[in-house]
C-alpha cells in the first residue's frame, strides 16, 4: 500500500491508521496474513469506498494484480477486524 500512497498525505495517513487498527485486531485473533497483495487491495478498497463511492473492486483488483473474487474474499475477512465489529 505504501507504494501506492507515498509520499503520505492526509488520506494516506488515514488509510494506514485504519490498516494498523485492522492489524492489531487481526493479530489479537491470530489471523494468518496469507496473501499480502489481496490484503493490501482489500484494505485499500475498504478505505477508498468509505470516502469515494465511485471506486470499483475491478479497478482496485487490477491495481494490486489480484482477481475481483480474491479481493472480495479478503474484504469479507478484514471486515471482522474493523473496530465497530466488536459488540
Image: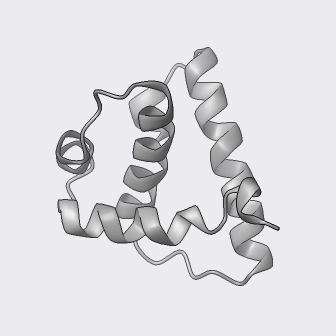
- For this orientation, the residue located farthest to the front is 87
Q: Residue at x 32, y 64 (%)?
A: 72
Does residue 8 appear in the picture of this structure? Answer: no
Q: Residue at x 42, y 55 (%)?
A: 42
Q: Nearer the viewer, residue 50 or 44?
A: 50
Position of 81 compared to 28: left or right? Answer: left
Residue 24 percent location from the top left of the image: 77, 62
Residue 40 vs 16, above or below: the answer is below
Residue 15 percent location from the top left of the image: 59, 35
Q: Residue 16 appears in which quarter of the rendering?
A: top right
Q: Residue 39 appears in which quarter of the rendering?
A: bottom left
Q: Residue at x 17, y 46 (%)?
A: 58
Residue 45 percent location from the top left of the image: 40, 44
Residue 11 vs 72, above or below: the answer is above
Residue 74 vs 28, above or below: the answer is above
Q: Residue 33 appears in which quarter of the rendering?
A: bottom right
Residue 79 percent location from the top left of the image: 56, 62
Residue 47 vs 53, above or below: the answer is below
Position of 15 compared to 60: left or right? Answer: right
Amino acid at each position: 500500500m505504501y507504494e501506492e500512497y507515498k509520499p503520505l498525505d492526509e488520506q494516506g495517513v488515514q488509510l494506514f491508521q485504519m490498516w494498523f487498527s485492522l492489524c492489531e485486531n487481526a493479530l489479537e485473533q491470530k489471523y494468518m496474513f496469507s496473501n499480502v497483495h489481496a490484503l493490501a487491495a482489500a484494505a485499500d478498497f475498504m478505505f477508498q469506498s468509505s470516502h469515494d463511492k465511485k471506486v470499483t473492486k475491478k479497478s482496485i483488483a487490477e491495481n494490486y494484480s489480484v482477481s475481483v473474487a480474491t479481493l472480495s474474499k479478503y474484504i469479507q475477512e478484514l471486515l471482522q477486524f474493523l473496530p465497530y465489529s466488536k459488540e
